Amino acid sequence: MNVEQARFNMIEQQIRPWDVADAHVLDLLATVRREAFAPPEHRALAFADLELPLKPGKQAVALGQVMLPPRVEARLLQDLRVAKHEKVLEIGAGSGFMAALLGHRAQSVLTLEIDQALAQTARANLQRAGVLNVQVRMADGAQADLSADGPFDAIVLSGSVAQLPDRLVALLKPGGRLLAIVGEEPVMRATLVEQRASGATITQPWDENVPRLLNFPEPSRFRF
């Protein structure tokens, strides 16, 4: 496989057509080696438009242990609009690739990963890639006490939730943004919360179904 041709095709055929036009985002995707964050057995698929399992077996997708499709990662990164002076929180480190992209845009990144093995992998991948401003912490993003770490300029959830997590929204600075994919199949929507002087505003710029993050609240289901 011609890796650089595959990377070029990923950007031109998947990412640009998904309304990703931010030149800095496109440059990052051309230079940060996505294949270095993919499991060795799946590196040939690192540039494919699919959810890439991070552990063996079918359970990886059910547990949300995946790299999201490149176009989804790119759109999250673009819409979050991270600046070099900002402090960022990510929920769901996975392999560390999204945290690496964030690290190139932010002053500092804290990324939480509930699975110990994945947290170790993400930490090692980031170290090999020379991304030094990202801290990987093994923690449950649905329950962790982050009061001592916040507030944050930007928060991104690298997986879906059934509803906006108010406890994370409360960690935003004035002017801060939280981006999450919210809802239930068949319709989940990227949901952007922005803290403004007049109060929080919410927009839903695009739709995409992605695996759940663990332990966030689910709506009650009544049976008759």
Image (tube, rainbow, N blue to C red):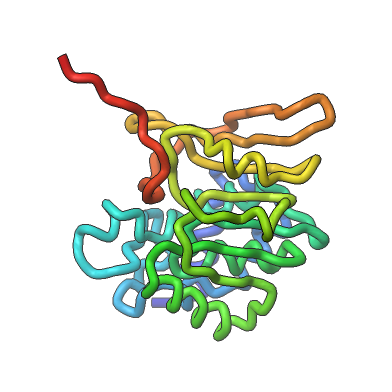
Q: Is residue 172 above or below residue 2?
A: above
Question: Could you tell me which residue is drawn at 56 percent across and 63 percent down?
Answer: 111
Tell me the residue at 37%/46% (across/down).
212
From the viewer's side, name the closer residue of 106 and 87: 87
Q: Which is more toward the observer, 70 or 217?
A: 217
Residue at left 68%, top 60%? 149
Q: Which of 108 and 79 is in front in this view?
A: 108
Q: In the orientation shown, which residue stands out farthest toward the bottom?
A: 128
Does the rendering let one see residue 12?
Answer: no
Q: Quadrant of the C terminus?
A: top left
Image height of 34 relative to 213, above or below: below
Give residue 168's position: percent from left, percent from top.
59, 44
Q: In which quarter of the image is residue 56?
A: bottom left
Residue, x 45% and y 69% (percent of image)?
95
Of the 4 image quadrants, the one containing the N terminus is: bottom left
Residue 98 locus on image (x, y percent): 55, 62
20 vs 211, left or right, is right
Check the image and name the residue furthest to the top: 224
| Residue 110 point in image, percent of width and height | 62, 64
In x, y percent, where is residue 67?
42, 60
Residue 54 seen anywhere in this rendered image of the structure: yes
Number of labelled discs?
0
In the image: residue 99, left or right of residue 122: right
Q: Dividing the picture into quarters, in which one does residue 145 lie?
A: bottom right
